[in-house]
Image (cartoon, rainbow, N blue to C red):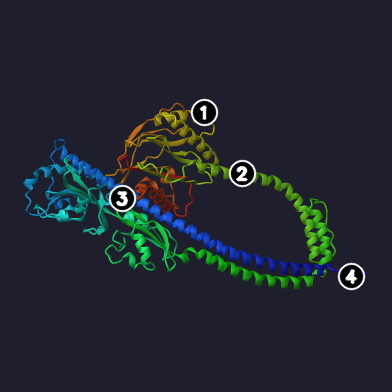
Amino acid sequence: MIKRNPIRRKVQNMVLTISIVALILTSAIGILSMLRIRNDSENALTKQMEQNLRNITTNKADLAESELGKFSAYTKNFADSIHEMYSTPEKFVKSYVPVPDAKYAGILAISRSLKDNTINVKDIDFEVNLLGNLEQLWKPLMTAQKDVITTIYFGTETGLLVAYDRQSDLNADNGNEVFYDHLKSEWYTKAKSLGHVCFTDIYNDIYDRGLTITCAAPVYDDNNKFIGAMGMDILISDLYRAIVEIDLGDDKASYAFLVDNKGNIIDNENASDKTNSLSSEKGINAEVVNRILSGQTDVSLTDDRIYYAYTPIESNGWKFCVRMPESVILAPVRSVQRNIIFMMSLFLAAFILITIIVTVATRKFSKDLTNPIISLSHDVEEISGGNLDYRAKIYDNDEIGDLAKSFNAMAVSLKDYINNLASITAEKERISTELNVATQIQADMLPRIFPAFPERKEFDIYASMNPAKEVGGDFYDFFFIDDKHLALVMADVSGKGVPAALFMVISKTLIKTRALMGGTPSEILYDVNNQLCEGNDAGLFVTVWLGILDIETGKITAANAGHEYPALKRVDNTSFELLKDKHTPAVATIEEIRFKNYEIELNPGDVLFIYTDGVAEATNSSEELYGTDRMIKDLNKYTDSKIDELLINMKKEVDKFTGDAPQFDDITMLGLRYFGTN
């Protein structure tokens, strides 16, 4: 007689066997994987971090070269202009350079000083009357770079120094001559001795404006005789932040720094501290110091297990360095290793506990549950196979019996539910899919990569759109019609949701397609309007502000079809103002409308802000409108901000005003700062 092998024993044996085998396999796999992950991760992270450090130092050095090269070009151009003044003085009017005067406190003014009291102004009258023309030459740059360039000046071998800055009043002496021996200054002697554009060592500005470096260039006459030197004082705070302030994680032992050509670490926060030399840097050794100061580009690991990446900045002899302990690089590996060990221990303990519980529970309940469960499993298998008319057999009035009754009731309900669910699910999936696709299509149609044209230095542009629903009716656009003409579009479709979004897609496509064919904004909107009016049974319309910017001249030719007034800040004005331009009806309202062109002349430094009514008509919980007056007031808080920061801050101002009130309309903004071609 064959010995009976009960199901409960099979279950117990199976559970124990699976538990033990799984425990052994998972433990072995986990340990081997952990060791391999640790080794591979260390090697990969080390190589990747070394390459990243090289890339960081090289990119930051290139950035510094670019910025310093810009100021070198300014200085060289000014030196060439002064050479021309001396070569052809008859081309210039007499423009007298006065002594410093207290009435020019805080404003840009040109003034002179003399080497000492042995110099008679009458003896250098020719230069005093000629060099006054430098004011008009220097003014545009000093205005545009007021936060970076503090002073521009030119010193001559005859002992005359002509300066242009906002601090001339501090040298005033009641109309008397002011004396300063510029011939002994570092910028003058260095430019004279080197014979080309150069930079001085870093020093603290005497007016406490910050850490400063001077860019200087020699000036020669037609006989190649040295006649003086041109100088420009530059605050390095912006350049320092752009180069040094990089994200190296939360570890304070990882940071970037600059070293000057004397081996001192440049500290922008503690500019007066001159004792912090590179050799005193914690964790560095003499070999690495020598490699850095010799101008090499490399990554070195010190005996203290600290990585130093470094590269020279050729223009002025600085070195850019990054310090990062090896422990920071390998921290993820150590963390992964600790987590793996912990999880393996936790898994082992949990697995053993579960195995014991399962074994005991299986032994206790398998006998009573086996037969009803087997029968019920057959019944459920029949129902789950699709036979919803089948009913399970009920053996006992217990939980298994209740479960059988529930399965029978479920079969009835499931049959009805499946019939209804098929149609409802299909409809919901269709609507959800269409909304998701519409949202993605609308987002993809708007320019979203910034900076949009990194190779173009004549302007900076940024835009944003926040829809009130899944899809919106607002849109913006900007694109080049040709190499010198940039089209700017801001529009608002009537209505909300899917209909407005569809009309927005059509409107945007028609405007861009027609604009690329050429023509003025009025001509473009005329053709687009006629196309949108055809078959517009829904009565939708779109307000449009369309401008075409001539990159070389700064002139914008624009047309406003029922849209909001743009806001404009001139470079010589500290405030934004609404530009109340000519309006015509919105696009798609009446066929054959003739739209009106008008012009805006942008000067280098001017900022244009265009938006939809979702900004001005944003409403708080008290039903109060945000309004254009409040918008202009908030814009004027950020007149010196970068374009992207301006729009981000304006969205925060609108959100701050509306508070918890829901957003009823799309909020769309576009900002443009014009720099010009020079």
Residue 342, located in which quarter of the rendered image?
A: bottom right
Percent of width and height locating residue 677: 32, 39
Q: How far apart are marks 3 and 1 (CA)?
A: 57 Å
Residue 254, located in which quarter of the rendered image?
A: bottom left
Please tell me whether mark 4 sits on a helix, a strand or a loop.
loop
Please tell me whether mark 1 sits on a helix, a strand or a loop.
loop
Residue type highlighted by circle 4: Lys
Q: How far apart are marks 3 and 4 (CA)?
A: 94 Å
Report which residue position mark 2 lands on: 431
Near-viewer residue (505 or 212) = 212
Q: Distance between the residues labelled 2 and 4?
A: 62 Å
Report which residue position mark 1 lands on: 534
> In the rendered structure, which disc, 2 or 4, sits on the residue that comes first in sequence?
4
Please tell me whether mark 2 sits on a helix, a strand or a loop.
helix
Q: Distance between the residues labelled 2 and 1?
A: 28 Å
Indicate which disc residue 68 carries: 3
Q: Which label sits in the foreground, 3 or 4?
A: 3
